[in-house]
Image: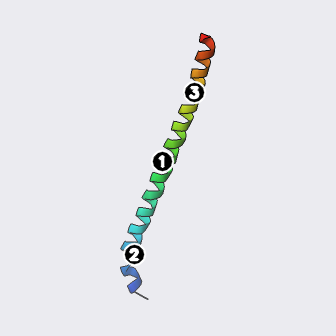
Amino acid sequence: MNWKVLEHVPLLLYILAAKTLILCLAFAGVKMYQRRSLEGKLQAEKRKQSEKKAS
């Protein structure tokens, strides 16, 4: 068996962990962006409705 391969296992695990962390952070960022966008749209609708009621 090639034991040289086993020397690289810790490095590969670090790379896998870093990649997973980056993907999780990216996913969380996208979700935050979507939520802010949706909240902005809802606030705009509320403003329009309140302006209609006021006039």
Q: Residue at x 37, y 73 (%)?
A: 11
| Image spot of residue 41 (x, y percent) | 58, 31
Amino acid under disc 3: Ala
| Image spot of residue 28 (x, y percent) | 48, 47
What residue would you read off at disc 1? 28
For the residue labelled by badge 1, is the local secondary structure a helix, a strand or a loop? helix
Sequence-wise, the earlier of marks 3 and 1 is 1
Marks 2 and 1, Cα distance to the nearest angstrom? 29 Å
Q: In this view, does 26 lie to the left or right of 11?
A: right
For the residue labelled by badge 2, is the local secondary structure a helix, a strand or a loop? helix
| Image spot of residue 35 (x, y percent) | 53, 38
User: Residue 53 appears in which quarter of the rendering?
Assistant: top right
What residue would you read off at disc 3? 44
Q: Residue most toward the front?
A: 55
Circles 3 and 1, Cβ within 8 Å, touching? The answer is no
Sequence-wise, the earlier of marks 2 and 1 is 2
Q: Residues within 10 Å of mark 1 (few under 14, many from 20)?
A: few
